[in-house]
Image (cartoon, coloured by chain):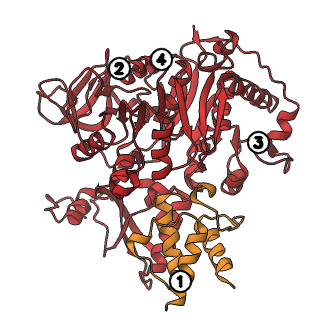
Chain colours: A red, B orange
Amino acid sequence: MHPNLAYACLTQFCENGLGDREAVQWIQSDLTETHLSYQCFEIESNRIANLLRGLGIQRGEVVSIFLPRSPILISSFFSVLKLEAISCILFSTLGEEALYDRLENSASKVIITRKSLLHKLLPLKEKLPELKAIVVMDIDDHVDEFVLSMKKLSSTAVETFAFEPLVEEETPAFLQYTSGSTGKPKAALHVHGALPDMLQSFQEVMQLQADDQYWCTADPAWITGLVYGIIAPFASKTRQVQYAGGYNVANWLTILSKHEVNVWYTAPTALRMLMQENEDKFIQYTFPKLRRVYSVGEPLNPEVYAWGKKKFQTEIFDTWFQSETGSILVANKPGLQVKPGSMGVPRKGVEIIICDEQFKPVPTGIQGYLCVRSGWRSMFRAYYHKEQEYNDKFHGDLYFTGDLAKKDDDGYVWYISRADDVINTAGHLLGPFEVESALLEIGEIGDVAVIGVHDPLLHEKVIAFVTLKNGCLWSKGLELKCRLHVQNKVSSTAIPAEFHLVERIPKNQSGKILRRVLKAWYEGKDPGDLSTME
Amino acid sequence: MDIKERLTNVFQQVFDDSTIELTPDLTADDVDGWDSLSHVNLLIAVEMEFGIEFKQSEIQSFANVGELMQSIESKLASR
């Protein structure tokens, strides 16, 4: 048996007299602050657990949380865990189709959201037969029998909720959606028994001291924001700030400086955005308490590393993991020499193997497929309702990450690129299929292919190649129509940075898009063997 | 229609939300989906609606809707 994640993160502290301890210093986008204790989250999550039980939510059923980062999102997450149901936190920037794919695949029974996001959900109602209710956090009254007010439901819900503190290690806890190079997004299923790995990695890599102030900038819909912004810091009683807003240079620097952040976990794209700011934006800020900066999501280029180290006067440690791995597996960490541009070394107990196409290890210094020996406890247990796709990720006991990398003589791992067509834009993995499907819905578009190419800010940017139907003309208006359609159907991260009008999309004889040819065209390189082209 | 009404229509179209109401102090943090990537779409739509152009340096320079409206008014006046 194993502690329920909600028990380990909240309830145990309240039972042991630590309920008044601050769990999060919450900072709004106008920089107003609220101090939230463990007891606050315990009571709120109990209320929500009671109302979800009242709606009939059972063990193992999925509750989706479609909210921007907020205290109520955190309470909702814990409430679902207390019911031993499965939480699925969704990016609030997702568009209708991306939402539908996830809600349909997860067979979500209830969605917790807010009023301003309802317009994306209501059109999907008829297509989601499993969905019992949408619970809206900020309306006073129920709209109908389906769209319900959280305030009204919780006004009669009690502040206590009895649940078993121990669960089977393999009890499902949460889903984390990620994209593949083909097909629809897949949900990595994680279990309550993942906690020891999450905590061990947090301690081994972050090495926080007792009174350190910690800030993880990642959205909780991202594995980093959930594991290292909520689960690990809550369970380890780490002092932390959380900021409700998006990237804002003045607010971010104010938080780092005024709130005396000691350890900061962010993304290379965020550091690159800061690097592009005018020097005068930094003048009024100093960061004497900032002891370490960590990054995750995409490779940290050596020039950004050097800029950040100088600007913040501290070391920067890049780390690597995936939605599927559930915890950091490779990291630069204190006590080891940082090699700029490297992912670092495997965490204790983690075996990284660089393989060839036959899954045989390749010699040091040779590029190959980044694989991990199965057995770490935070490993995903399934792609939810996609058994074949899960099995395809393994060869014996080797997990195939989809990344290309190499190892050096000192055991450091160096990221090369994705081994497939997945686009890593600002740390978000994006399948070209999702963008192509959305663009093909536009009447004027005849055919489309999407690739990722290098970008100095986002690591990779999305490029769309389109053909038009007879009689249609490309225009600024049509480009805007395409951009808005992708934004509102998929997500803002999926918006192509560039559109290129072409006569035809290169495909092989079985109709598969030859993305390497498009990439070569774009980069002005030789496209190589074209014998299979249609 | 005045500038505010036309701009409200643009916001509602770009963010696919007919409930958006503009106020001068409205910021990206107040509108779901308004991030640095969708902001580019917003400015393209504003350019097309008002027949104006923003310089590269202006794109990320507006702190709120009020500043964006002032910029539109200024560009329209100098045409």
Relative height, residue A257 to residue A478 (above, below):
above
For mark 4, give the secondary structure: loop
Q: Would residue A1 be found to the left or right of residue A84 on screen?
A: left
Dot 3: few (<14), some (14–19), or many (≥20) neighbours within 10 Å?
A: some
Dot 4: few (<14), some (14–19), or many (≥20) neighbours within 10 Å?
A: few
Q: Which of A62 and A357 is in front in this view?
A: A62
For mark 1, give the secondary structure: helix
Q: Are marks 1 and 3 in contact (CB under 8 Å)?
A: no
Q: How many labels does the image show?
A: 4
Dot 2: few (<14), some (14–19), or many (≥20) neighbours within 10 Å?
A: some
Kindly identify which numbered label has been placed on residue A399. none
Residue at mark 3: A133
Residue at mark 4: A210
Task: From the image, state whether disc 1 or disc 3 is nearer to you.
Answer: 1
Label located before the other in sequence (3 or 2): 3
Residue A109 found in image quarter: top right
Question: Residue A39, percent across and down?
Answer: 70, 22
Q: What residue type is labelled 3?
A: Ala
Say which quadrant the N terminus of chain A sits in: top right
Q: Which of A334 and B34 is in front in this view?
A: A334
Label located before the other in sequence (4 or 2): 4
Q: Which amino acid does label 2 sit on?
A: Ser
Q: In the current view of this chain or complex, which residue is farthest to the front? A: A284
Residue at mark 1: B74
For mark 3, give the secondary structure: strand
Task: From the image, state whether disc 3 or disc 4 is nearer to you.
Answer: 4
The lab-note entry on whether marks 4 and 2 share a chain reads yes
- Chain ID of residue with mark 4: A
Viewer can see residue A247: no
Residue at mark 2: A374
Q: Which of A197 and A379 is in front in this view?
A: A197
